[in-house]
Every structure is written in C-alpha cells, then in structure tokens.
Amino acid sequence: MTLRPCQQEPATRRLLQLGHWPQSATPELRSHVDGCRACKDLVLLTQTFRSAREASTSAAQLPHPGILWWRAQLRRRNAAVETIQRPLLGAQIFALAITICIAAGFTAYQIRRDQHWVSSTGEWLASISQSPTFHLEVLWSFAANKSSVSLAYLIPCVAIVALLSGVVVYLASEKQ
C-alpha cells in the first residue's frame, strides 16, 4: 500500500467528472490507468456510481407534485360525492315508492267508489286538450264535482309526504 497519491490522479478525476473518460484521454493516460491500482479503482468506482445514478433516475419518473396533489384532491372529492349520493338515492327511491303507492291507492279508491270515474276522467282530459289554456279553476272544479276527495284534503297530504321525504333525506345524510 502506498501512502503517496498518484501523479496522474487529478487528470483522471477531471476527465471522469466531465464525462470524457476514456474518449478524451491520451493513450499514455489510458496505459497509466491500466497499470496504476489507485487510478484504476477511481475509474471503476466513478463509472459504477454514475451508472447506478443514471439507472435510479431513469427508473423513478415521478410526475409534477402539483399533478399529484390535484389527483389526490379529485379522489377525495369523488369519495365525498359517493358517500353523499348513497343516502340521496335511497331517499329518492323511498319518495318514489310512496308517491306510487298513494297514486295507486287513490286510483283504486276512486274506481271502487265510482265506476264512472274512469270515463268521466277521460272526458275531462278531452275537454282540457281542446281548450288552448289551462287554468287551476278547471282542476279545482273537476276535483270538487267528480270526486268525493277534495283538493282541500289532497294538498295537505302531498305536503306531508314532501315533508316526510325531506326528513328522511336529512336523517340519512346526518348518519354519514
């Protein structure tokens, strides 16, 4: 083992740092590196570390941090929307089922109570389609004359169903 540094080591180190080894090296310097253990080790270690650094930088191509942050925010928002939509869908299905049940019950009640209700409803619809404008008075008079259930009872019932549907939506979203 020699304690003195090699005389050619600074020139070899400079060529290695610039990335010009062995293309720009003189034939004398190349033959010196082949014979000198310190210079040979310097070339070997430098080239090994350079190739390892190039392999690690080419393997890890991370996108810009802003894109990563934006994607994370988008995923978080989508997850929040999904958790909100589940109870809303349930409440909509519940409201639709109640509306269909009320309409079916009302229709069954009217058919059972008055057999001519279906024909009179058809006549009423035909008279509405002939008039160019639609007025609430026409609906009110039809409900008062043709049906035993007046709008004075029907409107509060629809309002109660709407209120109960709102309560169900509130309670379902509160649990989340």
Image (cartoon, rainbow, N blue to C red):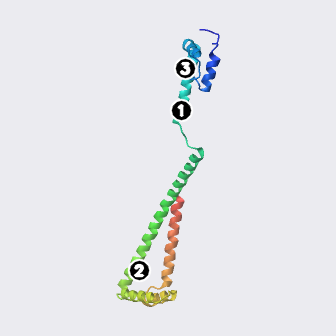
- Tell me if residue 84 comes above or below residue 33 in the rendering: below
The quarter of the image holding the N terminus is top right
- Structural crowding at the residue carrying mark 2, measured as other residues with C-alpha within 10 Å and reported as few (<14), some (14–19) or many (≥20): some
- Structural crowding at the residue carrying mark 1, measured as other residues with C-alpha within 10 Å and reported as few (<14), some (14–19) or many (≥20): few
SS at mark 3 in the image: helix
Residue at image coords 39%, 84%: 110
- Read off the residue under disc 1: 56
| Percent coordinates x, y for residue 89 in the rendering | 47, 63
- In this rendering, the count of numbered labels is 3
| Percent coordinates x, y for residue 61 in the rendering | 54, 39
SS at mark 1 in the image: helix
- Read off the residue under disc 3: 44
Which amino acid type is shown beneath numbered disc 2? Phe
Q: Please tell me the numbered disc located at residue 106.
A: 2
Q: Nearer the viewer, mark 3 or mark 2?
A: 3
SS at mark 2 in the image: helix
Q: CA distance from mark 1 to mark 2?
A: 74 Å
Q: Nearer the viewer, residue 145 or 139?
A: 139
Q: Nearer the viewer, mark 1 or mark 2?
A: 1
Whichever of labels 1 and 2 marks the residue nearer the N terminus, that label is 1
